């Protein structure tokens, strides 16, 4: 019932519904939230409603690891040790994409003040400034429960949850029937370490984005509730950007 109400409410207020797909201005967004806060889920909804292409640095890094490139080997070593990947590696990975795509949504980057400043400076140099940072706020005890019960179909990135979104056949992907896995960094010990890391770097970033006037805080006890607020904020932003281009 709640999901149906959410869908009806968002449709009635949708920028895309009001102006059409061709009139949605390019959006350049950073999605910030702790591991397990639902960034991937919200990114797909934003893509559907506002046509901003999700760029998941986590997925890009996993692809590099699977291909066993020199970059991938460095990434694999850092991930296994529960460490953050170096700034230069991440910047090169991201800059190749954001300088080409007109409308995008960054998930998982920047993670440090240095990375944020380098991204902001790059976008200013090419006259494509960052429009918004969406901060998804979720209780961290809830995050621990979400992640430690998560299952992944590694080739596609499809996710399941043992309690809330179980596969039709235990530990098998619904589409291909292939095995599902639990990532090595989704164990309780690893999750707690990742949350500590997130807390250490997130607060300085939040201060920076707040001073820039582009921070939007999105309380999100559930995906549906969080997206109502997110959708409202993005509707206002796209309306503002549309008027600037008239």
Image (spheres, rainbow, N blue to C red):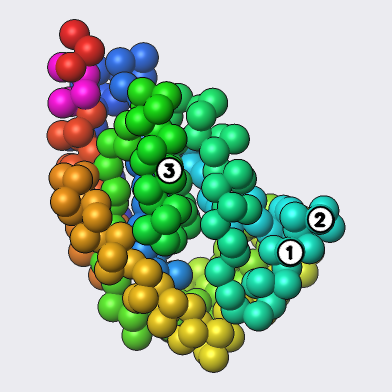
Q: Is residue 155 magenta?
A: no
Secondary structure, mark 2, is helix
Q: Residue at x 73, y 68 (%)?
A: 76
Q: Are marks 2 and 1 in contact (CB under 8 Å)?
A: yes
Quadrant of the rendered image containing residue 13: top left
Look at the image and tell me whether residue 204 can be seen: yes
Q: Which corner quadrant of the image does residue 111 belong to?
A: bottom left
Q: Where 206 falls versus 233 (above or below)? A: below
Q: In the picture provided, is 153 more to the left or to the right than 126?
A: right
Q: Which mark is residue 51?
A: none
Q: Is residue 203 above or below residue 210?
A: below
Residue beneath label 2, please? 70
In magenta, the rendered stretch is 239-243
Q: Which mark is residue 74?
A: 1
- Residue 10 visible in rendering: no
Q: Is residue 180 left or right of residue 54?
A: right
Please report whichever mark, 1 or 3, sits nearer to the chain's N-terminal start.
Answer: 1
- Where is residue 201 drawn, in percent x and y? 37, 69
Residue 242 lies within the magenta run: yes
Residue drawn 36% across and 14% down? 22
Q: Position of residue 167 (x, y in %)?
A: 62, 69
Q: Which residue is mark 3?
A: 119
Q: Residue at x 69, y 63 (%)?
A: 75
x 40%, y 33%: residue:
123
State the residue in front, 38 or 98: 98
Compare residues 21 and 237 and report the one nearer the observer.
237
Q: Nearer the viewer, residue 226 or 34?
A: 34
């Amino acid at each position: 019932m709640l999901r149906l109400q959410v869908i009806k409410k968002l449709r009635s207020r949708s920028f895309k519904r009001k102006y059409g797909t061709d009139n949605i201005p390019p959006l350049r967004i950073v999605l910030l939230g702790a591991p397990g806060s639902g960034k991937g889920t919200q990114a797909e909804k934003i893509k559907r409603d506002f046509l901003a292409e999700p760029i998941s640095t986590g997925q890009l890094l996993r692809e590099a690891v699977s291909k066993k490139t020199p970059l991938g080997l460095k990434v694999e070593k850092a991930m296994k040790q529960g460490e953050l990947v170096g700034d230069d590696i991440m910047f090169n990975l991201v800059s190749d994409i954001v300088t080409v795509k007109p409308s995008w949504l960054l998930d998982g980057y920047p993670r440090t003040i240095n990375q944020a400043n380098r991204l902001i400076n790059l976008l200013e140099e090419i006259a494509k400034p960052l429009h918004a940072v969406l901060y998804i706020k979720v209780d961290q005890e809830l995050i621990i429960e979400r992640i430690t019960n998560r299952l992944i179909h590694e080739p596609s990135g499809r996710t399941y949850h043992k309690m809330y979104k179980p596969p039709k056949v235990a530990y098998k992907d619904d589409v291909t029937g292939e095995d599902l896995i639990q990532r090595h960094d989704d164990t309780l010990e690893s999750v707690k370490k990742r949350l500590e890391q997130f807390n250490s770097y997130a607060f300085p970033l939040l201060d920076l984005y707040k001073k820039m006037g582009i921070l939007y805080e999105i309380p999100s006890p559930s995906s549906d509730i969080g997206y109502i607020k997110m959708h409202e904020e993005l509707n206002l932003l796209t309306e503002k950007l549309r008027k600037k281009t008239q």
